[in-house]
Amino acid sequence: MSRYVFKLPDLGEGTVEAEIVGWRVKPGDTVAEDDVLVEVMTEKAAVEVPAPVSGRVVSTTGKPGEMVPVGAELIVLETDTAAAAHTSPAPKSAAAAVAAPRATAAGNGAAAAQAEALSARSDRVATSPAIRRRAHEAGVDLRQVAGSGPNGRIVPADLQAYVARRPQPTPLRPAPKAVPAAARAAAAGSTQEIKVIGVRRLIAQRMSEAKRNIPHFAYVEELDVTELESLRRHLNGRLPAGAAALSYLPFLALALVRVLKDFPQCNAHYDAERAVIVRHGSVHVGVATQTPDGLKVPVVRDAQSRTLWDLAAEMRRVSEAARTNKAKREELTGSTITITSLGKLGGIASTPIINAPEVAIIGVNRAIERPVVLDGAIAIRRTMNLSSSFDHRFVDGYDAAAMIQGLKECLEHPATIFIDA
């Protein structure tokens, strides 16, 4: 037997440390090569770190929420392979240690008959980290799942089908017990402590920095979107059954592309280290997306080169990738201006926080029908507010208001969005 010391690898892009989000193993567990050992969070993304060799876990370093430097001891494994190096070198890049990890089921003392049935299959199951996570949460041994992908790779539909076929135990329903009044009172006055780690810690850190360092200038304007709603309904009515309907967001993105030509100072980054404003010729739209892990901002690149339908499809794709933790690292960075919407919860107005290093963010509030005065008469019109925030150090209030007025004109007369000036 030999001991294998695995150090936290270089996860790329100048990462010097990573936060422990959650261990998948504990001392005494047996792991196979490529099993996920731990999930860590860098300043860029969450990363699953796989086992470099098979063996038994002797010790782990770091609790959830603690930071571990690159090159520091992460886990010690006891292996039965004399050829295994006693100490792993820190790989030069994430690809050396975290590239395309494959899942294997942890040993759980399965019966001999089950082992014989599985012996024909390799212990190294090809699938994605997201599917491994779902299988782990569902208590599924991936070696029992037939893969329909290339070379037997397990795809989401395979796991879903297996879970659907698996017999579910019938839970026993014990007779309800009377809860003493004193116990109920104690439960009502109890507290719960939740450690702020991982994505939630990173969100809190960035929000605090943005609010602390950026003097926000907020501007809210009311729009009459009756014509835009008519166009949206007309286009959605021509879609085939089951196709995803258009929302207001792709129209807003196209309108932004047009308006930013006249307000390039709003499609920019502030490089604080160099004290330089970087204005971008391309419009890379960030789409603020609520996920189970908190708010993420996937990016639709080169909006200026996309059609309405292409924008809508790409917005849906990157948002879904962010919600399911399938977004690539480059899909979560590089936006030049962000749009955000609370959908049906949009309210009357909001004060969105700028997604630094950007200098502007546009928020969409709820659209409602209400009576307004139009040409001297009362009419029912569909109205909606745009809530925006600008970095007042670099965008003057006049320019911010003028930009939103430009958006208002485009969205109130949506045909102008599609007419080249």
Image: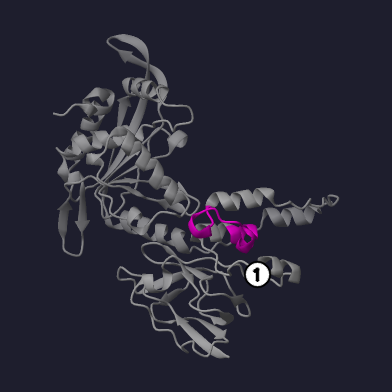
- Report the number of numbered marks: 1
Q: Quadrant of residue 254?
A: top left
Residue 335 position, x and y percent, is: 28, 50
Label 1 sits on what residue type? Ser
Residue 76 position, x and y percent, is: 52, 83
Residue 134 position, x and y percent, is: 57, 57
The crowd level at tag 1 (other Cα within 10 Å; few <14, some 14-19, many 20+) is few
Q: Which residues are magenta?
A: 135-155
Identity of the residue furthest to the top in this view:
377
Q: Nearer the viewer, residue 410 or 361?
A: 410
**Which residue is the site of mark 1?**
119
Q: Nearer the viewer, residue 158 or 172?
A: 158
Q: Nearer the viewer, residue 318 or 161?
A: 161
Residue 393 visible (yes or no): yes
Q: Residue at x 82, y 50 (%)?
A: 173
Q: Residue at x 73, y 54 (%)?
A: 185
Q: Residue at x 26, y 38 (%)?
A: 306
Residue 179 position, x and y percent, is: 81, 53
State which quarter of the image contains the N terminus.
bottom right
Q: Quadrant of residue 250?
A: top left
User: Where 105 falls versus 393 (above or below)?
Assistant: below
Q: Nearer the viewer, residue 230 or 309?
A: 309
The stretch drawn in magenta includes residue 140: yes
Q: How is the image coloured?
A: one colour
User: Where 46 falls versus 294 (above or below)?
Assistant: below
